[in-house]
Image (tube, helix red, strand yellow):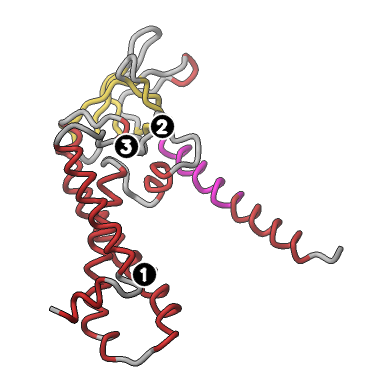
C-alpha cells in the first residue's frame, strides 16, 4: 500500500493523480445534467480547436470529452503498470524527469488506438442520444439528394440507423449515393453542411502541409543571421 501511495504522488503518475479526479467529477456533473457532454465541440470544423484536432486523429462520432477521458484513463493504467513493473526497481535519480516525459508520451501513444476503438464501439449510443456536434467529421452516404429549399438526407456509413439532414448551397447539392463528410452543424435547423469525402481528405492533407511549411519557415527565420 505504501508503494502505491508513493507512486501516486511521484512523477510522472502525479499528473494522472490530478487528472483522474477531474474526469470523474466531470462525468458526475454530466449525469446530474450540470455539465454538457459536448463540452468542447464547436458548430464547425473550420477552426483549429480541440475537437477538430481529435477528429483529425480519428475520434469523430463521439464527444471530445469521452475521447479525452478514455485517453487519460488508459494512459494512466499504462503508466502505473510501467512504474510498478520497471521504474520502482531502478535507481534513476534526476533522470526520472526525462524518463517520465518519454513514458507519458509513450503511454498516450499506446492508449490512442485502444481509446479510438472503444469510442467507435460507443459511438452509436451517442448518435441515438442527440450528440449532434460530435458527428462532425463523420462520413455519410446520401440517401435523398437535397433540392432547392429542401434538405437532403443521409446516413452514417458506420451506423446506418443514424440519419441526418443535409443542407447545401445551390451549387453544392449532393447526389444520391454520394459519400460526404459533415463539416458544420446548423442548430436552428438541426441539419448539417457537408463536403465531398475526397475534398475533405485533400483539404486536411493540404492543411498539414501548410502547417509543416509554416513551422519550418519560422524555424529558419529564427536561425537566420541578423
In x, y percent, where is residue 172?
A: 46, 21
Q: Quadrant of residue 174?
A: top left
Front residue of 108/189: it is 108
Question: CA gap, disc 1 to disc 2?
Answer: 32 Å
Q: Quadrant of residue 200?
A: top left
In x, y percent, where is residue 159?
A: 19, 37
Q: Quadrant of residue 149?
A: top left
Q: Residue at x 29, y 35 (%)?
A: 38
Residue density around tag 2, few if under 14, some if 14–19, many if 20 or more, within 10 Å: many
Q: Which residues are magenta?
A: 196-210
**Numbered label attached to residue 104:** 1
Residue under label 2: 183
Question: CA gap, disc 3 to disc 1?
Answer: 25 Å
- Left or right for 52, reference 127: right
Front residue of 104/147: it is 104
- Left or right for 104, reference 74: right
Front residue of 29/195: it is 29
- Left or right for 83, reference 54: left
Q: Which of label 1 and label 2 is nearer to you?
A: 1
Whether the magenta-drawn stretch holds residue 67 is answered as no
- Left or right for 112, reference 120: right
In x, y percent, where is residue 78?
A: 25, 71
> Which of disc 1 and disc 3 is earlier in sequence?
3
Residue under label 3: 39
Residue density around tag 3, few if under 14, some if 14–19, many if 20 or more, within 10 Å: few
Q: Residue at x 29, y 20 (%)?
A: 165
Residue density around tag 1, few if under 14, some if 14–19, many if 20 or more, within 10 Å: many
Q: Secondary structure at mark 1?
A: helix
> Which of disc 2 and disc 1 is earlier in sequence?
1
Q: In the rendered image, which quarter contains the C terminus?
A: bottom right
Asked if labels 3 and 2 touch by Cβ distance under 8 angstroms, the answer is: no
Whether the magenta-drawn stretch holds residue 197 is answered as yes
Amino acid at each position: 500500500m505504501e508503494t502505491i501511495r508513493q507512486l501516486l504522488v511521484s512523477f510522472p503518475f502525479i499528473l494522472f493523480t490530478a487528472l483522474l479526479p477531474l474526469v470523474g467529477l466531470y462525468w458526475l456533473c454530466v449525469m446530474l445534467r450540470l455539465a454538457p457532454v459536448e463540452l468542447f465541440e464547436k458548430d464547425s470544423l473550420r477552426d483549429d480547436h480541440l475537437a477538430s484536432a481529435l477528429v483529425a486523429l480519428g475520434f469523430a462520432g463521439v464527444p471530445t470529452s469521452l475521447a479525452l477521458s478514455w485517453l487519460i484513463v488508459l494512459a494512466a493504467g499504462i503508466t502505473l503498470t510501467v512504474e510498478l513493473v520497471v521504474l520502482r526497481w531502478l535507481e534513476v535519480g534526476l533522470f526520472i524527469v526525462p524518463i517520465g516525459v518519454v513514458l507519458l508520451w509513450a503511454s498516450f501513444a499506446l492508449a490512442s488506438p485502444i481509446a479510438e476503438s472503444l469510442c467507435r464501439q460507443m459511438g452509436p449510443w451517442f448518435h441515438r442520444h442527440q450528440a449532434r456536434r460530435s458527428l462532425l467529421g463523420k462520413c455519410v452516404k446520401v440517401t435523398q439528394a437535397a433540392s432547392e429549399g429542401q434538405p437532403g438526407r443521409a446516413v452514417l456509413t458506420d451506423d446506418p440507423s443514424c440519419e441526418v439532414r443535409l443542407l447545401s448551397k445551390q451549387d453544392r447539392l449532393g447526389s444520391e449515393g454520394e459519400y460526404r463528410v459533415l463539416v458544420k452543424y446548423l442548430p436552428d435547423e438541426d441539419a448539417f453542411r457537408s463536403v465531398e469525402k475526397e475534398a475533405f481528405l485533400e483539404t486536411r492533407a493540404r492543411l498539414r502541409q501548410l502547417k509543416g511549411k509554416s513551422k519550418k519557415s519560422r524555424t529558419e527565420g529564427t536561425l537566420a543571421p541578423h
